[in-house]
């Protein structure tokens, strides 16, 4: 079987702010269809790495390729085309409070100028159905929504253009354990049906355990270890000890063994 090219390839990435080095010769790949969780202590550079992959910051050294091309080579129309191949779900949901659910989900579709309104309507209702919301829900304003519904609408918007790559930043932050489990199950089922690739930053061990196909630990300015949760947990390092083998870690990982 022919091996597919990575969706994201980071090679020898060195980044920083002023005199502060955040990443030093960091290398990492994200393969098609995987759900890669980036974990690491506060300040280890998870958000900064995502911003570099998104092409929002310039690196000091090294290269980042997305869909096989250097991120900085996407300019003008190419950059617009690239942003249609990926979707993003931010921690807060980041919905526009003045727009009803329908228009929030329609926003990325309306930016594609040639789409007729009846097609937009069809796609928006389909995306809402994907996340378990109805045509009635489309009329609601963000202020009418529960935390779980806000996440669903934000996910519907992130998936509006049927992206190949999805960025998730703390997807379950702010949800109670039951809503969090439901949202993780929804992402998992959509991932199975649609086959997109995911890169996710989260501190939530239940989310990491239930969703990740692979985990990469950021520490000491690089990817310290990557692999299955079980592999990662074998590595001796103070962060891994505290994160995976602390009380919360034992509780979350204990659930797997049940
Ligand atoms: N705009 C900025 N200007 C200066 N320093 C920054 C900036 N953004 C981040 N940093 C620094 O870069 C380092 C990495 O920050 P980053 O936010 O990427 O970490 P993180 O792993 O995402 O942390 P957390 O888990 O707390 O969100 C930190 O030391 C942070 O203080």
Image (cartoon, helix red, strand yellow):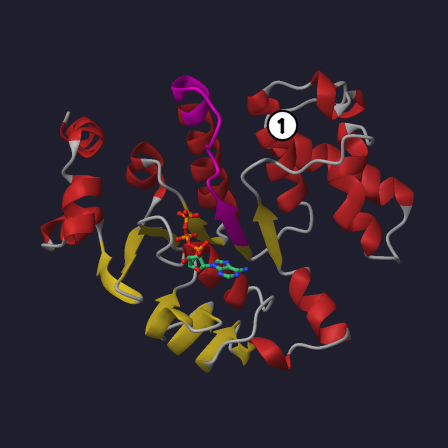
How many numbered callouts?
Answer: 1
Report helix, strand or loop for mark 1. Answer: helix
Q: Quadrant of the N terminus?
A: bottom left
- The single residue placed furthest to the front in the displayed view is 19
Q: Residue 235, how many percent across, how many down?
A: 11, 55
Name the residue at 50% across, 40% down: 190
At a point 23% along the width and 57% down the height, the residue shown is 227
The residue that label 1 is drawn on is: 150
Please give the range of residues in magenta. 166-180
Percent position (x, y) of residue 183?
Answer: 47, 29
* Viewer-nearest residue: 90 or 116: 90
Image quarter of residue 156? top right
Q: Is residue 186 visible?
A: yes
The quadrant in which residue 93 appears is top right
Label 1, ligand 1: CB separation under 8 Å = no
Residue 28 rendering spot, x and y as whole percentages: 35, 69
Image quadrant, ligand 1: bottom left
Determine if the magenta segment contains residue 241.
no
Question: Does residue 136 sit above or below 100 in this rendering?
Answer: above
The answer to whether one can see residue 5 in this image is no
Residue at 51% from the left image edge and 77% from the top image edge:
68
Q: Nearer the viewer, residue 107 or 25?
A: 25
Residue 97 falls left or right of residue 194: right
Residue drawn at point x = 52 percent, y = 47 percent: 194
As displayed, is residue 38 above or below residue 28? above
């Amino acid at each position: 079987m022919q091996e597919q090219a990575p969706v994201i390839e980071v090679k020898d990435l060195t980044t920083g702010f002023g005199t502060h080095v955040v990443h030093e010769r960091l290398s990492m790949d994200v393969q098609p269809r995987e759900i890669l969780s980036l974990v690491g202590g506060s300040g280890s550079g998870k958000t900064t790495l995502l911003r570099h992959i998104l092409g929002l910051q310039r690196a000091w050294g090294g290269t980042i390729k997305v869909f096989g091309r250097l991120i900085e080579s996407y300019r003008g129309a190419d950059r617009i085309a690239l942003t249609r191949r990926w979707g993003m779900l931010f921690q807060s949901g980041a919905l526009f409070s003045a727009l009803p659910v329908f228009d929030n989900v329609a926003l990325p579709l309306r930016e594609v100028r040639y789409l007729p309104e009846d097609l937009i309507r069809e796609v928006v209702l389909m995306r809402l159905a994907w996340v378990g919301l109805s045509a009635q829900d489309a009329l609601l304003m963000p202020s009418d929504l529960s935390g779980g519904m806000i996440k669903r609408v934000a996910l519907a918007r992130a998936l509006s253009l049927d992206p190949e790559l999805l960025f998730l930043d703390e997807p379950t932050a702010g949800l109670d354990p039951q809503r969090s489990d439901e949202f993780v199950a929804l992402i998992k089922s959509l991932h199975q049906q649609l086959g997109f690739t995911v890169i996710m930053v989260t501190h939530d061990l239940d989310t990491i355990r239930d969703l990740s196909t692979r985990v990469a630990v950021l520490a000491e300015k690089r990817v310290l270890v990557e692999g299955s949760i079980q592999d990662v947990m074998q590595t001796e390092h103070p962060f891994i000890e505290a994160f995976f083998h602390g009380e919360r870690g034992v509780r979350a990982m204990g659930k797997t063994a049940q």
